[in-house]
Image: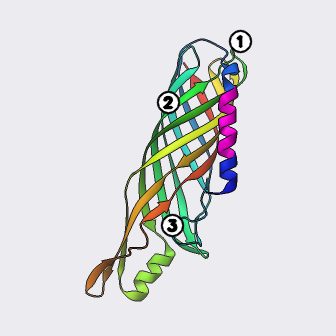
Amino acid sequence: MRCWVVGILCSLCFVGGTLPVWAGSDVSRFSLGFQGGGVLGAQHQAVDGFEDTKFSPAFTYGGGIMYRWGNGFAVELGVQRFRMTLKEDGEKFGDLTLTPAMVLLKYQGMPRNGKGVTGHVELGGGVSFAKFQEGPFIKDLERSLGVNVDVTTKKSFVFEMGAGLDYFFAPHVSLNTDVRVLLSRVSTKWNVQGGGGSRSVPDVDKFRTSNVQLLLGLRYWF
C-alpha cells in the first residue's frame, strides 16, 4: 500500500479520537444523503505480480440513508458506484465497475442551534459487486489471434473507514465532505478460448482495488 494512504489512515484515527467533543445536539433524526467525487488507487500494482499495472483515477457517485441517535452515534446504509480503467504501460486492458453496498457505524456531530460546522467519523464494511469489460488491448488481441478472452469477477468484501466535515447552513440541510479509504481485493479469472481448446491464465487471479475517495455531498435531515 502507498505511504500516503497509511498517512491518511493515521489522520482518520486521530480525527476519530477528537470528534466526540463535537457531538452538539442531542436530537435523534433520519437523513438522506447523496455524494460524488474522485477515486484514487491505493496500491502500487492493480494486478498481483504485475508491477506496471495500475487503475486510473475515477469518479464515484452514490447515496445512503442514516439514523442518528441523540448521543451522536449513527448507522448508515449506503451504496455507490465507480468504474476504474486497468492499464499496463499505457495500454488499456478494460474497465472494472465496482458497486460497494455497505453498513457504516458513525459518530455524527450536529450543531445545537441548527447551523454551523461539525464533523463525523465512520467505520464499516459490506459487499462489493464487480464487473469487468474488456478494453481495446484485449479486443485487438482477440482479433489478431482469433481467440476469445473471457474475464469473470466475483463479489468481494470491502472494509471502509473515513471522516469529514459537515456544514449545516439550515437545520434540515448540510453540505458534507468526506475522505474515505476502502480496502478490498476482487477475485478474477481470465479464460482464453480458441485454437481448438480453452485455457485459463493462472497468474492473473486478483485485482487490487483498495482506493482513497475524496467526496462532496448534500444531506437532508428529517
Where residue 76 is drawn, which disc sits there? 2
**Secondary structure predominantly adopted by residues drawn in magenta:** helix
Q: Name which residue type carries label 3.
A: Val
Q: How crowded is mark 1: few (under 14 residues within 10 Å), some or many (20 or more)?
A: few
Can residue 22 be found in the magenta stretch? no
Q: Nearer the viewer, residue 86 or 46?
A: 46
Where residue 189 is drawn, which disc sits there? none
Dot 1 corresponds to which residue? Answer: 113
Q: Is residue 52 left or right of residue 144?
A: right
Asked if the residue at tag 3 contacts the one at tag 2, i.e. Cβ–Cβ closer than 8 Å, the answer is no
Q: State which quarter of the image contains the C terminus.
A: top right
- The location of residue 137, given as percent across then percent down, is 50, 77
3D distance between C-alphas at marks 1 and 2: 24 Å
Q: Residues within 10 Å of mark 2 (few under 14, many from 20)?
A: many
Comparing labels 1 and 2, the label whose residue is closer to the camera: 2
Comparing labels 2 and 3, the label whose residue is closer to the camera: 3
Relative vertical location of residue 166 with respect to residue 110 in this rendering, above or below: below
Q: Is mark 1 on a helix, strand or loop?
A: loop
Residue 174 seen in the figure: yes
Q: Name which residue type carries label 2.
A: Glu
Relative vertical location of residue 168 with respect to residue 44 in this rendering, above or below: above
3D distance between C-alphas at marks 3 and 1: 50 Å
Q: Is mark 2 on a helix, strand or loop?
A: strand
Dividing the picture into quadrants, the one containing residue 108 is: top right
Dot 3 corresponds to which residue? Answer: 47
- The location of residue 26, given as percent across then percent down, is 60, 11
Residue 175 seen in the figure: no
Q: How crowded is mark 3: few (under 14 residues within 10 Å), some or many (20 or more)?
A: many
Q: Name which residue type carries label 1.
A: Asn
